[in-house]
């Protein structure tokens, strides 16, 4: 993907990139010039990129990175997740997959990879120890073993064909990815890797204490003028964890001898809206002296927060004009894993019982927005897997009435159309497929599924 983007004019950070990036660009250009088939395959990708460029962010390649993280091995590049479950930005450019298949074959990308494989391996060897040391020091500070629970994944990808100034940190459910490129100066963006790793370790702890955080929600009322992303103003769990992470960063990234630097970092975080950073910074001084690890100490940190005191502190904070760019993004922009993110992950792993429990908890604690509709959508898919089509139909109908996300809305109608087709209610099925097309989701897989439903009645796949 990176080679294709570079061949289509992606030049960001080229002046500060390692020599291997220019070498690969030259390799691809040589193939394209000598092979009309390769040139045609490359040109179709370039055209796709032009057609899918966002007017508000021209040249942005992050949707393609997002998609690549969810693609399997070449030459098929099949999606790891069901297409309906892809993150929105990845789904938007999903149509490039078939074009990438042709480019991979026509340009002989496997041979080019073998030619440069040793250079990539050398980069991994060069940066393995610094990254491993950073993770180990973070674990030691938190008094935790390296987190490797079933279903969780933390991975760092080195791709020298991307700009070294750009770091893509992403959270999909319980999977955390960092895509980085070393610069010509030989340095890697270690702070962003540590930040993502702290989310990987601490987000599951926040999830376990979701209900106990409800008493902290009044603090959100005092953050309306803060410049941070709106998600933090709506979800106290996100606010708490980001504040804690920034406090940890102040204590482990800045030497104790530089207290002024630490305080400046804490103050800057508070000015962006993360007003609990100061509390956690002081509380961590006590944590450092105790033998209790973060896994057991997380609840105590929450319990000792004085809401009235922190609200007073928030009201006395002068907020900055703007916040620094977010480090980590997710399937929903800048969100730590919610109950439904984890429900999706459990469902993908085949644990329908755990997925149902999490989704039902969201339904029980209805907080408005898209969450109830998304929970109904998950419950409907679980019912479909279980063969309870009556329950599935009810849940999909509920999803169409309460969800606003175009993709979830469209697929709720598509699934309802398929159920009606199975029930031989063709007229009702056609209405659902039409509603799916009208839902506003422009991704290719959604349109194709709805159009297939309109052209012929849905037939379940027969077992092999």
Image (spheres, rainbow, N blue to C red):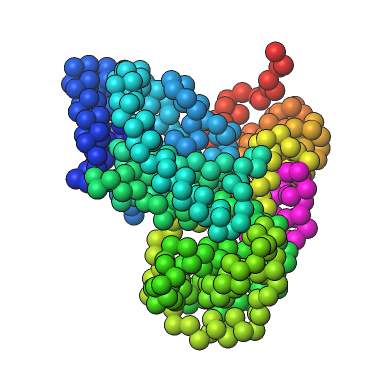
**Quadrant assignment for the N terminus:** top left
Rendered location of residue 186, percent (x, y): 28, 45
Specify whether 200 is left or right of 218.
left
Q: Quadrant of residue 231?
A: bottom right
Q: Looking at the image, which residue is at 76% across and 43% down?
A: 354
Q: Is residue 338 visible?
A: no
Q: Is residue 21 above or below residue 195?
A: above
Specify whether 417 is left or right of 444.
right
Q: Is residue 117 visible?
A: yes
Q: Looking at the image, which residue is at 76% across and 54% down?
A: 361
Q: Which residues are magenta?
A: 354-379
Q: Main secondary structure of the magenta part?
A: helix
Specify whether 146 is left or right of 157.
right
Q: Is residue 169 magenta?
A: no
Which residue reaches farthest top?
Answer: 464
Q: Looking at the image, which residue is at 43% across and 59% down?
A: 326
In-front residue for pair 166/102: 166
């Amino acid at each position: 993907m990176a080679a294709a983007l570079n061949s289509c004019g992606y030049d960001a950070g080229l002046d500060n990139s390692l020599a291997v990036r220019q070498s690969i660009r030259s390799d691809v250009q040589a193939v394209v010039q000598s092979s009309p088939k390769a040139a045609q395959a490359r040109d179709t990708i370039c055209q796709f990129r032009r057609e899918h460029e966002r007017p508000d962010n021209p040249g942005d390649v992050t949707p393609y990175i997002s998609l690549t993280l969810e693609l399997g091995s070449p030459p098929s590049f099949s999606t790891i997740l069901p297409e309906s479950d892809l993150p929105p930005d990845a789904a938007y450019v999903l149509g490039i997959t078939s074009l990438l298949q042709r480019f991979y074959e026509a340009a002989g990308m496997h041979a080019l990879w073998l030619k440069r494989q040793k250079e990539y391996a050398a980069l991994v060897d060069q940066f393995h120890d610094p990254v491993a040391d950073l993770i180990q020091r973070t674990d030691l500070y938190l008094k935790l073993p390296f987190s490797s629970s079933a279903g969780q994944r933390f991975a760092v990808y080195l791709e020298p064909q991307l700009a070294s100034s750009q770091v893509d940190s992403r959270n999909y459910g319980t999977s955390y990815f960092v895509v980085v490129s070393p610069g010509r100066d030989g340095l890697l963006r270690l702070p962003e890797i540590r930040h993502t790793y702290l989310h990987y370790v601490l987000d599951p702890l926040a999830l376990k204490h979701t209900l106990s955080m409800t008493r902290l929600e009044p603090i959100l009322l005092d953050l309306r003028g803060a410049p941070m992303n709106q998600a933090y103003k709506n979800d106290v769990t996100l606010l708490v964890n980001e504040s804690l992470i920034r406090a940890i960063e102040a204590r482990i990234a800045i030497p104790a001898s530089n207290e002024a630097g630490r305080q400046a970092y804490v103050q800057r975080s508070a000015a962006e809206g993360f007003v609990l950073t100061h509390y956690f910074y002081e509380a961590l001084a006590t944590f450092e002296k105790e033998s209790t690890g973060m896994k057991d100490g997380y609840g105590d940190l929450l319990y000792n927060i004085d809401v009235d005191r922190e609200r007073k502190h928030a009201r006395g904070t002068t907020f900055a004009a703007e916040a620094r760019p977010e480090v980590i993004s997710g399937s929903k922009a800048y969100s730590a894993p919610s109950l439904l993110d984890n429900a999706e992950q459990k469902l993908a792993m085949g644990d329908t019982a755990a997925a149902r429990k999490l989704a039902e908890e969201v339904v029980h604690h209805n907080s408005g927005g898209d969450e109830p509709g998304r929970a109904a959508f998950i419950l409907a898919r679980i019912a479909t897997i279980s063969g309870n089509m009556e329950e599935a139909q009810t849940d999909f109908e509920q999803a169409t009435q309460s969800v606003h996300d175009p993709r979830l809305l469209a697929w709720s109608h598509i699934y309802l159309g398929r159920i009606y087709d199975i029930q031989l209610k063709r007229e009702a099925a056609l209405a659902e497929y039409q509603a799916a097309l009208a839902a506003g989701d422009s991704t290719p897989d959604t349109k194709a599924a709805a159009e297939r439903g309109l052209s012929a009645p849905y037939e379940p796949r027969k077992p092999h």
